[in-house]
Image: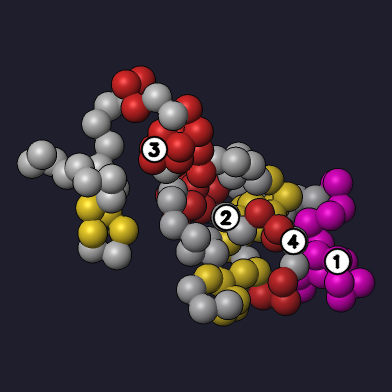
Amino acid sequence: EATNGDSATPAHTNRQQKIFYCADCQRAGLTKLYVQELLTRPGWCRYPTQKWYDHYTCPIGTHKIDFCDEPQFSNVSMFIKGREWLDEKEKVLQFTGKPSIMPPTFVVQNGIWQGGIHPRS
């Protein structure tokens, strides 16, 4: 049973819990590895998922669980707000306006080199 009597509240909300739930919602990244590791630890169980939007899944019943890679369903978030500035190097160029502080950056959008530069220029 995945609930503590209230169908809207998963069992993991009990602070004395002995079982923790994790799921891979397929948002990419290292979640699959984290979930595999958590499942080797005592008390961790895989929580079932369901299709959510086109490319993702979420915990079944859209419950919040102990760990998953969809922040709105996880008690622990592994995403940093604004992280696109860390993940997408071309955004740093937009932000700083100083290409000299960055290694050469080549951006392709819709199959076209952006900014008139490409690796062979």
Picture residue at 48% right of the left edge, 52% below the top: 31
Position in image of residue 116 (x %, y %) = 22, 46
Q: Main secondary structure of the magenta part?
A: loop
Residue 36 appears anywhere in the view: no
Is 66 one of the magenta-colored residues? no
Q: Residue furthest top?
A: 101
Q: Which residue is mark 1?
A: 9
| In this rendering, the label closer to the viewer, 1 or 3 | 3
| In this rendering, the label closer to the viewer, 1 or 2 | 2
Position in image of residue 106 (x %, y %) = 25, 42
CB within 8 Å, label 2 to label 4: no
CB within 8 Å, label 1 to label 3: no
Q: Which residue is mark 3?
A: 89
Q: Which residue is mark 4?
A: 64
Q: Quadrant of the N terminus?
A: bottom right
> Does label 4 or label 3 sit earlier along the sequence?
4
* Spatial CA span between label 2 and label 4: 11 Å
> Does label 2 or label 4 sit earlier along the sequence?
4
**Which stretch appears magenta?**
1-16
Disc 3 marks which amino acid? Lys
> Does label 1 or label 2 sit earlier along the sequence?
1
